[in-house]
Image: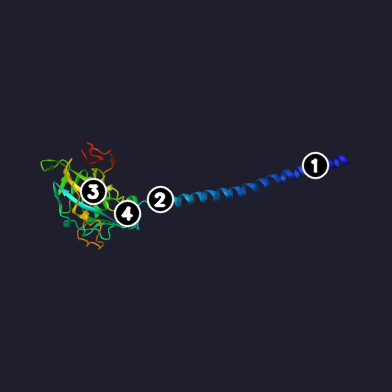
């Protein structure tokens, strides 16, 4: 009798254990799912914040106000800067009376990696397309056109801040409009000149230390459209590449 009773008790315990196991597993699985959701959510938030900070750290930001010296050089002559009027109201990149490009982004759309030379070109009505440059006065220059008895080419000369007479410029011959403003106090000359021409600093470079922050008057003329070309690579210093899509350093 005792053995039979013990056997029944064992079976009841086993049965009870069997019925509780699925419930116990469910109780363990549900909290684990919640924890997993929280972990994934936190990871996504951390990534988004880090990405946002990375964007904000690419200068110039909306809190920056930079200047860059600018000049236009056409076959040995400096183009009259007075003919370059701002034609875009409240432009984030524009030309002031001091002859300097003023870079003051207004949103993410024109800040950081989006703060490019093309914004300036649009603000003054200069058009670039496939090796051709058209100035606001209607004059057009195309790669290969005669320039002081030699084939000319459209190029952007870029110097770093504090550049001196011995500082070679970076010479950009493609995707000029996509060239980024990366530092305060750079110098730019948009030129049509023969390959190897000595293009010097523009007169406005002397104003970098004391820029004029007064807003320029906006011309009534409609802005021109600036077209960018794909590709922009950099070659080692020491000479110019024969490839028209290459950015290079003067010296050859």
> Along the polypeptide, which appears first: circle 4 or circle 3?
4
Which residue does the image show at 20% across and 48% down from the upper left? 190
Instruction: Specify the label residue 164 is tagged with.
Output: 3
Inter-mark Cα distance, 1 to 4? 77 Å
Instruction: Specify the label residue 54 is tagged with.
Output: 2
> Along the polypeptide, which appears first: circle 4 or circle 2?
2
Q: Secondary structure at mark 3?
A: loop
Placement of the C terminus among the 4 image quadrants: top left
Q: In this rendering, which labeled residue sits more in front, label 2 or label 1? A: 2
> Along the polypeptide, which appears first: circle 2 or circle 3?
2
Q: Secondary structure at mark 2?
A: helix
**How many C-alpha atoms fall within 10 Å of the one at disc 2: few (<14), some, or many (≥20)?**
few
Placement of the N terminus among the 4 image quadrants: top right
Inter-mark Cα distance, 1 to 3? 96 Å
Q: Are marks 1 and 3 in contact (CB under 8 Å)?
A: no
Instruction: Tell whether 147 sits left or right of 118.
Output: left
> Along the polypeptide, which appears first: circle 1 or circle 4?
1
* Residue 101 falls in image quadrant: bottom left
Image: 19 above or below 100: above
The percent position of residue 26, horizontal first and vertical second, equals 65, 47
Inter-mark Cα distance, 2 to 3? 32 Å
Residue assigned mark 1: 10
Residue assigned mark 4: 110
User: In this view of the protein, which residue sits in the foreground, 163 or 82?
Assistant: 163
Inter-mark Cα distance, 4 to 3? 29 Å
Q: In this rendering, which labeled residue sits more in front, label 2 or label 3? A: 3
The percent position of residue 149, horizontal first and vertical second, equals 10, 41
């Amino acid at each position: 009798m005792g053995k039979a009773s013990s056997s029944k008790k064992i079976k009841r315990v086993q049965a009870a254990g069997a019925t509780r196991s699925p419930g116990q597993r469910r109780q363990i699985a549900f909290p684990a799912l919640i924890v997993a959701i929280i972990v994934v959510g936190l990871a996504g938030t951390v990534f988004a914040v880090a990405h946002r900070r990375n964007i904000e750290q690419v200068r110039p930001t909306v809190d920056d106000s930079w200047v860059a010296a600018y000049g236009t050089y056409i076959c040995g002559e400096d183009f009259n800067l007075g003919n370059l009027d701002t034609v875009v109201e409240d432009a984030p990149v524009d030309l002031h009376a001091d002859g300097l490009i003023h870079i003051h982004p207004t949103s993410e759309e024109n800040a950081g990696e989006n703060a490019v030379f093309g914004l300036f070109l649009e603000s003054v009505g200069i058009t670039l397309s496939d090796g051709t440059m058209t100035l606001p006065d209607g004059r057009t220059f195309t790669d290969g056109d005669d320039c002081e008895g030699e084939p000319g080419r459209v190029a952007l000369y870029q110097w770093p801040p504090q550049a001196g007479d011995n500082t070679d410029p970076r010479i950009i011959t493609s995707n000029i409009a996509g060239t980024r403003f990366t530092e305060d106090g750079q110098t730019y000359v948009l030129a049509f000149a023969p390959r190897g021409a000595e293009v010097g600093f523009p007169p406005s470079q002397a104003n970098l230390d004391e820029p004029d922050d007064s807003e320029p008057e906006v011309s009534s003329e409609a802005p021109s459209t600036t077209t960018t070309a794909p590709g922009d690579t950099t070659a080692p210093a020491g000479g110019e590449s024969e490839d028209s899509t290459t950015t290079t350093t003067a010296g050859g």
